[in-house]
């Protein structure tokens, strides 16, 4: 069974992931009986806060391409569980890469707004149904090109127009 499992971007922005790290550490602190006495309420707080923190830290998008069944699944990975629905296709027309400008806005308490921009490279696959599926992202063009070459090789005969293959 040929399956390509691609881990994509995180679901939460970096500020939420930092907050999630704080929640996870705070939740772990409730598990440790510092006063020598173990309280049930502390355990309950720890059991609630720790998984919430882990979810904020680790939740991410992903893509599974099942070569043998000719399906792809766009999923969200949450605490080890993949939530997504498989979609059938006949073949992959091609893989391609676009340079994309990503902008994030940060506001201060005084209301000052600052925009931060960066260019990233996003890889897509075009299916026979004219559907464009986001495959992967990277800041460096050479890295994303290497990844796409690998995806083309793994997909094999399903790819009609091989743009990135060495052969």
Image (tube, helix red, strand yellow):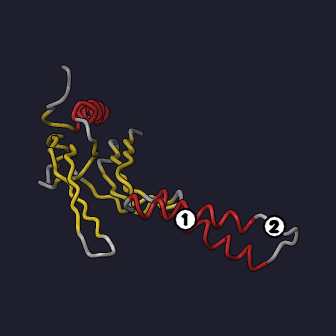
Q: Furthest-top residue in view? A: 167
- Return the x and y of residue 69 as percentages of the image width and height: 33, 47
Instruction: Examine the rendered structure and indicate whether residue 154 appears above or below residue 87.
Output: above
Q: Is residue 16 left or right of residue 146?
A: right
Viewer-closest of 21 and 1: 21
The residue sitting at 14% across, 44% down in the picture is 98
* Mark 2 lies on residue: 33
Which quadrant holds the N terminus? Answer: top left
The residue sitting at 24% across, 71% down in the picture is 112
Label 2 element class: loop
Q: Furthest-bottom residue in view? A: 41
The residue sitting at 74% across, 66% down in the picture is 31
Mark 2 to mark 1: distance in Å? 20 Å
- Mark 1 crowdedness (10 Å alpha carbons): few <14, some 14-19, many ≥20: many
Q: Furthest-right residue in view? A: 36
- Return the x and y of residue 27 as percentages of the image width and height: 65, 67
Label 1 element class: helix
| Residues under numbered marks 2 and 1 in contact, where contact means CB atoms less than 8 Å apart | no
The residue sitting at 37% across, 53% down in the picture is 62
Viewer-nearest of labels 2 and 1? 2
Image quadrant in which you'd find residue 153: top left
* Mark 1 lies on residue: 53
Instruction: Give the mark nearest the N terminus, 2 or 1.
Output: 2
In this rendering, the count of numbered labels is 2
Which quadrant holds the C terminus? Answer: top left
Viewer-closest of 54 and 123: 54
Q: Is residue 55 left or right of residue 83?
A: right
Image quadrant in which you'd find residue 76: bottom left
Image quadrant in which you'd find residue 121: top left
- Return the x and y of residue 5 as percentages of the image width and height: 39, 45
Viewer-closest of 32 and 44: 32
């Amino acid at each position: 069974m040929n399956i390509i499992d691609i881990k994509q971007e995180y679901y939460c922005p970096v500020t939420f992931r930092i907050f999630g790290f704080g929640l996870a550490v705070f939740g772990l602190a409730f598990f440790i009986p510092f006063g020598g006495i173990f309280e049930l309420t502390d355990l309950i707080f720890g059991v609630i806060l720790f998984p919430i923190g882990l979810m904020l830290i680790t939740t991410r998008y992903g893509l599974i391409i099942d070569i043998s069944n000719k399906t792809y699944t766009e999923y969200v990975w949450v605490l080890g569980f993949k939530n997504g629905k498989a979609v059938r296709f006949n073949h992959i027309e091609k893989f391609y890469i676009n340079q994309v400008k990503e902008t994030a806005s940060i506001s201060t308490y005084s209301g000052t707004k600052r925009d931060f921009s960066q260019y990233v490279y996003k890889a897509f696959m075009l299916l026979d149904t004219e559907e464009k599926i986001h495959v992967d992202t990277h800041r460096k063009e050479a890295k994303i090109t290497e990844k796409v070459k690998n995806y083309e090789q793994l997909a094999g005969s399903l790819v009609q127009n091989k743009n990135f293959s060495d052969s």
